[in-house]
Amino acid sequence: MASPVTTQTVQPLDTLRFDTSGPPEITSVLSGHLRLLGAQAADTAPGARPAGHTVLSGGDFAPAEARTTWASRGTGIDDEATVQAATGIMAVHGRRDGEPRGLAADFTAAATAVLTVQGLLAALLGQARGCSPAQVTTRADRAGLLAVSQYVAAAGADEGEAAELAPGGPPFVSADRILFELETLDAGVWAAFWRALEAPADAVRAGWRPFQFRYATACAPFPQALHTTAQAHPLHRIRQAASVSGAEVCVLRTLAERAAEHDGAAPWALDVLGPGRMPRTRGPGPVLGRPLAGLTVLEAGRRIQAPLAAHLLGLLGADVIRIEPPGGDPLRGMPPACSGISARWLALNRGKQAVEVDIKAEADRRRLREMAAEADVFLHNWAPGKAAELGLDADDFAPVNPALVYACTSGWAGRLTDAPMGTDFVVQARTGVGEAVRPEDEKPAPSLMTLLDVFGGLLGAEAVLAGLLLRERIGHGVRVDSSLLGAADVLTAPALRRAVRGDNPRRPAGFRRPLPTADGWVAPGDDCAAAAAAYDLRGLPTDDALRLLHTHGLSATRVTTDLSDLHHDSRFTGSISRDAHGAPVVPDPWSFA
C-alpha cells in the first residue's frame, strides 16, 4: 500500500524519446518498460539503427545509448535456448527432473531487457549528477550468469551443499488430481501438516531438509511416501490439514485463469512523496561506469529479492549498508561455505557494509531513522504491514529525510485480495508460471530455480533507479513498490497474450529440450530445434555432434551440466573470477564506455 504522504504519480522519463532495434524477445520488454517509465517511441525509419541498439534522448539529457547482444561473437550463443544452455540455466532448472531442461519462457531475454533499462537509467542518473554521457553494453549470457550466480558460487565452494542434489520436488497431486504447491518456513508446521494427513513419521522427518533448502539446491528429493500421502486425500482434506497446521496450500493456476484476472498494472509503482530537499553531495562524485558513486543505500532484506536489488545498486557504485538482526544474518553460515562464509550469501552480499539493528527495539528503530536521514535509498522486503507496524514506513522517514527513495520489494504489492504467502514458489503457482516454464508434454510445475526471486530483484533495482532519476528531476522523495507478482507478469506476458487471443498459451511438446550425446548434451537454437531433432546424436561425442549440426547449418551449443566447469569454459574466458573469500564471482551484467 502507498504511504499516506503520497501526493501524485509521475514518470521519470517524461519528455524523452527512444528508438530500439534487436531481437524481439528483448526489445518487446525493453520498449514496454521505457514506455511505462514515460518515454515515447521515436519516429525512426526501419533499419535506421543497427541491431541491438537503443537510444534514449530528449529533455536536458545528452543521448544515452545501449548496445545489447546475446553473447560475444564466435561463441555459438545466439538466442534464448543457447544462452540458457551455456550459462547453466538448463542444468539448474532440470535438477528436479534429473536432466537438463530449458525454460519454456524467455527468461534471459526479459532479464537482459530489464538490465538494459537499468543501464540507461543509471547513465541518465550519472549525467544528472555530473558524469559524462556513457554508452552501456548488456549481454544475455551475462544476464544468464547473474541468474545462476548463487548456484555458480555454491558449485565452487569449499564444501558440499546443504541438502542432496537429486531429482524430485513439488508440486503435489491430490486424490482428485489437482496440482498444488505447499509452503511453510517452519519445521513444526511442516510436521503438523503431514501428521494431519497421517504420513509416515520417518518420511516427514526425512522430507523437511530437502524441502527447506529447495530454493538453494533447485531440487527437493523428499520421500515418495509424501507424494503418496498427498494422492490419498482430496483437496478439501488437504486444505483442512493446512488450516489446522498453519501451512500454505496453493493450487496451481493456469495461464488462462491468470489472463482472465490480470489487472494490467505495471510491474512496479513510483509515487512522488511530499515536498523534499535534495541531499547534500556526499563523498566523491560519480565516475565512468559507477554512476551511483557517492549515494548510500540502506538495505533491510532477506533471502534473495531485496539483497539482489541492493547488490546491483552496489555494482553501479552505491555504498550499500546492510541492516541485519542482532547476531548477524543467519544465512551467512548456510552451506556450502568459502572461508567460513556462505558462498550463496556472498553472491548477493559481498562488498556490503553490515550494521546490526534490532528493529523490535524502539532505540534501534530510532537509530535506523537517523541512518536514513543521511541515506538516498531505504530498501526492504518485509512482510505486508510490518513497516507500518514498526514505524518504519515511508511517512515515518519523511520528517528526517523527505527526499528519500523508499523502496519495498514484496510478494504481491497489495494487488490480489486473496493473496497467499508471497514466496517465490507460491507466486509461481498462483500466476501460471508453472505452465509457462514447461512445454505441453511436461506436467505444470514451478521451477525450483527461484526464477521470481531473481527476476523480482532485477525489477526492484530497475524501480529504485527510476525513483532516483525521478528524484533528481523533481527534487522530491519517491516511494517505489515492486513485487514477485510483477516479475511473474513480465515473464509470462507472451503466454498471457496468447491466452487472451484464444490460442494455446503453452509451448509445444519438447520445446527447448536438449539432445543427449555420448558424453553430454547439446541444445539447438530455437529456430533449428526441429531440424536438429532429426539427427540421432547419442553415439557421438558432444564435440562431434556439434560439428555435425554446424555442418548442416544448424545453430547449437554444448549444455553446461557442471557449473564448476564455467571457470574454464572457452565461451566465458576470463568472465568468472573469485573474491577475497575464494567464492566464484560472475561478471557485472553491464559495462559502460
Image (tube, rainbow, N blue to C red):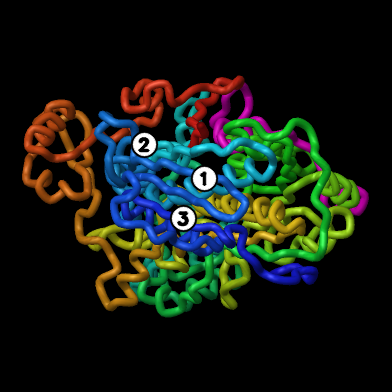
**Dot placed on the residue nearer the N-terminal end, 1 or 2:** 1
Q: Position of residue 25 (x, y in %)?
A: 34, 54
**Dot placed on the residue nearer the N-terminal end, 3 or 2:** 3
Above or below, comparing residue 425 to residue 586 in the picture: below
In-image side of 524 versus 322 (left or right): left
Q: CA distance from mark 1 to mark 2?
A: 29 Å
Q: How many residues crowd around disc 1 within 10 Å: few (fewer than 14), some, or many (20 or more)?
A: many
Which residue: 49% across, 64% down?
A: 198
Q: Which residue is mark 2?
A: 87
Q: Quadrant of residue 328?
A: top right
Q: Amino acid at mark 2?
A: Thr
Q: Which residue is mark 1?
A: 64
Residue 360 located within the stretch drawn in magenta:
yes
Tell whether label 2 touches label 1 (CB within 8 Å).
Answer: no
Tell whether label 2 touches label 3 (CB within 8 Å).
Answer: no
Tell whether label 3 touches label 1 (CB within 8 Å).
Answer: no
Examine the rendering and report whether any part of residue 182 can be seen. no
Q: In terms of secondary structure, where does tag 3 sit?
A: strand
Above or below, comparing residue 544 to residue 223 in the picture: above
Above or below, comparing residue 101 to residue 333 in the picture: below
User: For the magenta stretch, what is the residue range?
Assistant: 335-364
Residue 318 located within the stretch drawn in magenta:
no
- Numbered disc in front, either 3 or 2: 3
Which residue: 49% across, 38% down?
A: 135
Q: Which residue is mark 3?
A: 18
Q: Quadrant of residue 270?
A: bottom right
